[in-house]
Amino acid sequence: MLKVGLTGGIGSGKSEVSRRLAGYGALIIDADLVAREVVEPHTPGLAQVIGVFGTGILAGDGTLDRQRLGEIVFHDPGLRAKLNAIVHPLVGERIRELERGADPGAIVVEAIPLIAENHMAGFFDIVVVVDVPPRIQEDRLARDRGMTREQVAARVAAQASPEDRLAIADIVLDNSGSLAELDREVGDLWAELCRRANAAAES
């Protein structure tokens, strides 16, 4: 199994890269989706979050109102640390469970936004960083997610700097161009991952 860490700042396009890698045959483990799973209604994770933040972070249907919770924690590092202390261990446990279910020869791509922040690079055979200039990142978040410039700035500030992410990269994927350019970039990336997986299997 080749274990690949895929990371990048908010709005960099990790999901687009993941979808294309899945199309080639990679097993994708998306930490954001796992983070949603571990705080679904009636889970111990959601109960712990409510215990810290109260029922005001619930939507009318009993699900976690992620936008409301995000507004709270992204402006308060102490509360963000409390949330992470609940969610991160649950996410890690679920990811390890998914890894154990993978085929021995699989290329497993784990899309995790906080690899640099949590000093996780050493857990992977390869770290791929999806990189975009800050201006493009801000434009995408404003256009695609309806964020204000202030909301974008708060979320970017809560993550590692581009320099810190690039420092842990084995491969940098530039996603500042068109989707057609991204298709070519991901095709080249997949060829390199297959090459490394085959080399590891033969060694």
Image (tube, helix red, strand yellow):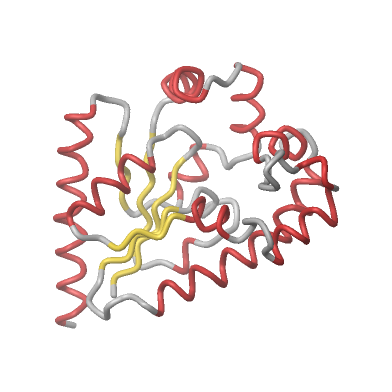
Q: As displayed, is residue 30 above or below residue 76?
A: below
In the picture provided, is 196 more to the left or to the right than 11?
left
Q: Where is residue 9 in the image (x, y as percent from the top left)?
A: 49, 38
Residue sitting at x 49%, y 68%: 95
Query: Does residue 89 appear to the left or right of 53 in the view shown?
Result: left
Q: What residue is drawn where x is 20% and y is 66%?
A: 196
Q: Which quadrant, please, contains the C terminus?
A: bottom left
Residue 137, percent across and down? 45, 25
User: In the image shown, does 6 or 127 lie closer to the viewer?
Assistant: 6
Asked where in the image residue 70 lies, by quadrant, the reply is top right
Which residue is more in the foreground, 64 or 82?
Answer: 64
Image-based side of 59 in relation to 32, left or right = right
Task: Find residue 106 and report its horizontal and vertical position in percent.
Answer: 25, 71
Residue 121, placed above or below residue 56? below
Give the residue drawn at x 45%, y 17%: 143
Query: From the image, which quarter does the N terminus lie in?
Result: bottom left
Q: What's the residue at 59%, 51% (across, down)?
A: 117
Using residue 122 as the reference point, say whether residue 118 is left or right of it: right
Please provide percent x and percent y for residue 184. Answer: 15, 38
Quadrant in the rendering for residue 82: bottom right
Q: In this view, does 123 lie above or below 78?
A: below
